[in-house]
Amino acid sequence: MKIGITCYPTYGGSGVVATELGKALASKGHQVHFISYAVPHRLTNFVENIYFHEVEISNYPLFEFQLYTLALTSKIIEVVKYEKLDLIHVHYAIPHAVSGYLSKQILQKMGESLKVITTLHGTDITLVGLEPSFLPLVKFSIEESCGVTAVSRFLKEKTLTNYHIEKDIRVIYNFIDTKRYRPDGKRNFRDHIAPGGEKILVHTSNFRPVKRVADTIRVFEKVRKEMPSKLLLIGDGPDRYECERLSRELNLDKDVMFLGKQDALVEILSSSDLFLLPSQSESFGLSALEAMSCGVPVISTSVGGLPELINHNETGYIAEIGDIDRMAKYAIDLLTNDKKYNEFAKNSRDRAVNEFDIEKIVPLYEQYYLDVLNC
């Protein structure tokens, strides 16, 4: 198949999933064309069967704001027409699904056909898409997509409920390359971070309010009172300064390390003992899956799709939003019980391999492509 993929090229989960999906499809012989305003950050090396088409945005002074939706539409039309794509797979509804619909309609007028598949990832449905200025467009573009997938059952139900639509949405979970994300921590990295044998807790996110990164620091404060430990915070975003201030206020600044955006996640995760994810909302929890694949148990909140990923009292623990005391209690319980910890670590790895491995999930997308093309 010749497949076009449109996604945001930044560090967000939707871009990561789209890029890894494209790379996996290319390795299976499909021709994959990425269409975006920049090369996806996970597409760092040459990959056979992958092509990139940059969306050029006009800076004409008449336009106060960039017209990305229209520029993307034009580029999709161009690529479909000249590369003879079988379908376009857009990730994140805003504005990609709208551009997909416009492309399909214009190509139809030109005597060309186009199948558009939309994958919903989370905040495009639960947050941004619900704004009055966007809701009608999101609803319409979902209804007009030839196929729609969601990354969790939670997100599927939220979409059907929030937008009052009757659409067949297929749940295809996010995935992980378990051959790459595996529990083989680098001793020298761990010795550098925790030279005294301290326990290492880790969190990764975009540091936005919905991630409640400050809760991670407060949980760590309670854990540190019980045992020597370090906290690694990976990522960047609007709440980083406040979190740095909080760590200094609590006298944790020597044990809380802000590592910024990192590509070497495997080395960091596989050297860690526990992953904390106290989010207010998570449609799936890709960062938690990455940790689990590295054999790291997860303590999270009971929101969104996380209960579909984390088995409470088997691969980690789940608590209510803001229940810092309970999350700290769970963390201390695991980190002070070697037998239980080793069992949870093994369960985490096994669940990632058996349920969410890339080789199990990508064929579901391939089959869905065929189903849409044949309908």
Image (cartoon, rainbow, N blue to C red):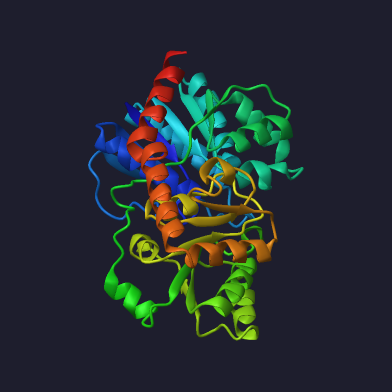
Q: Is residue 235 left or right of residue 250?
A: left
Q: Which x, y percent locates residue 340? A: 46, 57
Q: Is residue 222 above or below residue 5?
A: below
Q: Which x, y percent locates residue 20? A: 37, 45
Quarter of the rendering occupied by the N terminus? top left
Q: Is residue 368 above or below residue 227?
A: above
Name the residue: 56% across, 35% down.
Answer: 97
Q: Is residue 43 above or below residue 173?
A: below
User: In which image quadrant can residue 161 be found?
Assistant: top right
Q: Nearer the viewer, residue 204 or 350?
A: 350
**Can residue 112 be seen in this snapshot?**
no
Q: Nearer the viewer, residue 192 or 35?
A: 192
**Can residue 94 be seen in this snapshot?**
yes
User: In which image quadrant can residue 242 be found?
Assistant: bottom right
Q: Which x, y percent locates residue 2? A: 33, 29
For the view shown, which residue lies furthest in the top direction? 375
Name the residue: 38% across, 66% down.
Answer: 268
Q: Which x, y percent locates residue 191? A: 32, 78
Name the residue: 28% across, 48% down.
Answer: 179
Name the residue: 61% across, 69% down.
Answer: 219
Q: Is residue 102 left or right of residue 180?
A: right
Q: Nearer the viewer, residue 286 or 292?
A: 292
Q: Is residue 184 left or right of residue 243?
A: left
Q: Nearer the viewer, residue 28 or 256?
A: 256
Q: Is residue 263 above or below residue 243?
A: above
